[in-house]
Amino acid sequence: MAHENGIDAWVGHRLKDLRSERGITLVALSEQTGISVTHLSRLEKGHRQPSIGSLLQIARVYGISLSELIQEQEPEDYHLVRADDVVEHPGQDGYYSVLSGPGSTIAAIRVVVEPGKSTKDAKHVGEEWLHILSGEVIFRMADREISLNSGDSLHFDSSKIHRLTNTSRAPAIVLIASTAATMPMHHPVPPAKRQR
């Protein structure tokens, strides 16, 4: 698996460019995403590692897929990710790899949750499905806890606060499929107008 150097700075530049292209302020973006202005500013400067929940929320506001948000566009009509070419991005949730392509109607993400760590609380419009590839995690949603082991799958309404916690001594690898990034808001931020 490949690790990308300076990924926080690259994603930060991408976030800032998207916001500039659309001509909106950090305050307006904060109001639409529910993410604080301070946190958004730190993400844009590359001083903070984004959580998957934050990226999904920002992508939803812009009406683009998670892949379009953090990866360069591909001209092909398919998206292939070879095992040796997978890029792991460090994030607040552990390491994650986006496996879905640009323009996808679903975000497919592989997350590695380190022992004793939890993902941040997430809450976003849409549905989510997760499958435990290896390890053990506790899935928390509201006041419920569900223990999940290798091979288990779970499908749920992602508009409820949820998180994963790895209580074991080994990393847990989780495959997540989410519709959150591509479900448009009532008033998504419009794309930039092309100059002629």
Image: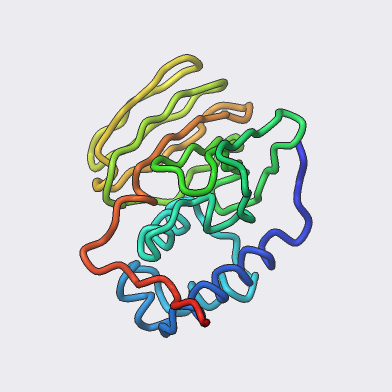
Q: How many labels sit on residues?
A: 0
For the N terminus, the image quarter is: top right
Compared across the picture, whether 80 is left or right of 179 comes to right
Q: Residue at x 60, y 68 (%)?
A: 14
Q: Is residue 185 above or below residue 95?
A: below
Spot occupied by residue 7 in the image (x, y as percentages of width and height): 70, 59
Can residue 195 be seen here? The reply is yes
Colour mode of the rendering: rainbow
Q: Is residue 136 above or below residue 48?
A: above
Can residue 111 be seen here? The reply is no
Q: Quadrant of residue 16?
A: bottom right
Q: Nearer the viewer, residue 160 or 106?
A: 106
Q: Residue at x 57, y 36 (%)?
A: 78
Spot occupied by residue 18 in the image (x, y as percentages of width and height): 51, 72
Q: Nearer the viewer, residue 162 or 84?
A: 84
Q: Is residue 192 above or below residue 89?
A: below
Q: Is residue 5 above or below residue 111?
A: below
